[in-house]
Amino acid sequence: QVQLVESGGGLVQTGGSLRLSCVASGRPLSTYAMGWFRQAPGKERELIAAISRSGGSTRYEDSVKGRFTISGDNAKNTVYLQMNSLKPEDTAVYYCAAASGAFSVTWRASAYDYWGQGTQVTVSS
């Protein structure tokens, strides 16, 4: 079983950047496909970025494509979400999640079975 802890959220102005980190403990992250989700107030949680176990494949939701980058560092057992050109509509709680049964990029939310506690990102206009 893996435990996930996110950090790096905060308040940033429109156009700014943040890098979220998700540190894993208990098991190597390389044994999971990983994803970043977000949930804005009054909205459902949505999957916005995913990476395969090997780190060789990624996928992004259309609204963040070209602005966000998901990556992993197996030596640090950490997955990152680099967020550039932030917009007010990116304001949400961001969660990392691990899919224990997946090898490739996993775009099915129900496949994720381990979750972090979330980190708040607020983008001011």
Image (cartoon, rainbow, N blue to C red):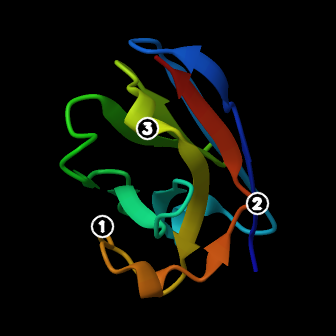
Judged left or right of residue 19, residue 107 is left
- Classify 10 Å Cα crowding around label 2: few (below 14), some (14-19), many (20 and above): some
In this view, the mark in front (1 or 3): 3
Q: Earlier in the sequence, mark 1 or mark 3?
A: 3
Label 3, label 2: how far apart the Cα atoms are:
18 Å
Q: Amino acid at mark 2?
A: Gln
Residue contact between numbered discs 1 and 3, judged by CB atoms under 8 Å: no
Q: Earlier in the sequence, mark 1 or mark 2?
A: 1
Judged left or right of residue 39, residue 10 is right
Label 1, label 2: how far apart the Cα atoms are:
22 Å
Q: What percent of the width, then of the height, locates residue 27? A: 73, 68
Q: Foreground: 57 or 83?
A: 83
Q: What percent of the width, then of the height, locates residue 2? A: 74, 72
Q: How many marks?
A: 3
Q: Which residue is mark 2?
A: 117
Q: Secondary structure at mark 3?
A: helix
Q: Earlier in the sequence, mark 3 or mark 2?
A: 3
Residue, x 23% and y 44% (percent of image)? 63
Q: Which residue is mark 3?
A: 90
Q: Amino acid at mark 3?
A: Asp
Q: Secondary structure at mark 2?
A: loop
Residue, x 67% and y 70% (percent of image)? 115
Q: Which residue is mark 1?
A: 105
Judged left or right of residue 98, residue 86 is left
Label 1, label 3: how far apart the Cα atoms are:
22 Å
In this view, the mark in front (1 or 2): 2
- Does residue 53 appear in this view? no
Q: Amino acid at mark 1?
A: Val
Residue, x 56% and y 70% (percent of image)? 98
- Does residue 14 appear in this view? yes
Q: Foreground: 4 or 42?
A: 42
